[in-house]
Amino acid sequence: MRGSELSGRVAVVTGAAMGIGRASAEALAREGAAVVVADIDEEAGAATAAGLRGTGAEAIFVRTDVASMADMEAMAAAAVAAFGGIDILVNNAARAIGGVVDEIDEESWNTVITTNLSSVWRGMRVCVPEMRKRGKGAVVNMSSVQSLAGFKGWAAYAAAKGGINALTQQAAIDLAPHGIRVNAVAPGTIMTPLNERIFATHPDPQGLIASWNNAHPLGRFGEAPEVGEAVLFLASDRASFITGEILRVDGGLVVRGE
């Protein structure tokens, strides 16, 4: 069933071809937002946009490499050309490359930082000016519980996600006078294509899955739509007095403290 909570608003979602990004785009579209599906994967991104249109939503796909400022500028321009402006930005695109601090190579480090952290700044840099024109807006950045607790072997990823938290809080202060709220969602382990690839390359995938399940007090992985609902909440007027928040959607992983 389609709602109207976000009717008349335009949402840009990066990394929207699959996983959490797709679930976020679907949640926003379900409540009436016109959605710009931005992703580097042309086939999957176009399929996501087509799927949204199939539900009666307005949606376009824009091929976007979030590591490229030119691509991000083109993404914002496409949103304005298609729908007249931007009201909501979901910075979701990410790469997961493991490695401990004294072993990860510089190329991998730089790839993770530019894709996961610098892209969040790029997204705000190109979309926030359009929000200012409207006098309000909402930004939701995708962080991770790895920004809040240490997990062995993810130095660059944790650094990038921790940077997202700091940038989110700084942007919340900077943009509040313009009516723009900035928040982040910090998921625990979510069953997404990204994590499926991690499991597939692990020497003991079933053991890893079991250990990750057991790490969550709720005893299971999260599902992408559960994160999408958190994104929808923060993007909507239901969160009108919330800014600078890092919302954990982690099945109790962080509070367990193990």
Image (cartoon, rainbow, N blue to C red):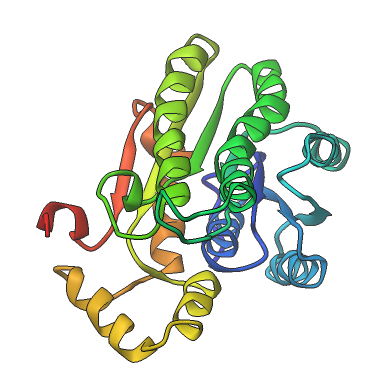
How many numbered marks are there?
Answer: 0
Q: Position of residue 24 (x, y in %)?
A: 54, 57
Judge from the rendering whether residue 142 lies leftward or rightward of residue 74; answer left or right: left
Is residue 186 visible in the rendered image? The answer is yes
Front-lying residue, 40 or 153: 153
Judge from the rendering whether residue 116 lies leftward or rightward of residue 77; answer left or right: left
Q: Position of residue 137 (x, y in %)?
A: 57, 27
Residue beneath the point at 73% across and 52% down: 38
Q: Position of residue 242 (x, y in %)?
A: 34, 29
Front-lying residue, 111 or 193: 111
Q: Quadrant of the C terminus?
A: bottom left
> Farthest residue toward the front?
102
Residue beneath the point at 61% across and 56% down: 29
Front-lying residue, 10 or 47: 47
Q: Is residue 96 above or below residue 131?
A: below
Residue beneath the point at 66% across and 35% down: 123
Q: Quadrant of residue 243?
A: top left
Is residue 231 visible in the rendered image? The answer is no
Judge from the rendering whether residue 252 lies leftward or rightward of residue 166; answer left or right: left
Q: Position of residue 116 (x, y in %)?
A: 56, 46
Q: Is residue 15 above or below residue 196?
A: above
> Farthest residue toward the top?
177
Q: Is residue 81 above or below residue 154?
A: above
Front-lying residue, 154 or 27: 154
Residue beneath the point at 43% across and 46% down: 143
Judge from the rendering whether residue 161 lies leftward or rightward of residue 250; answer left or right: right
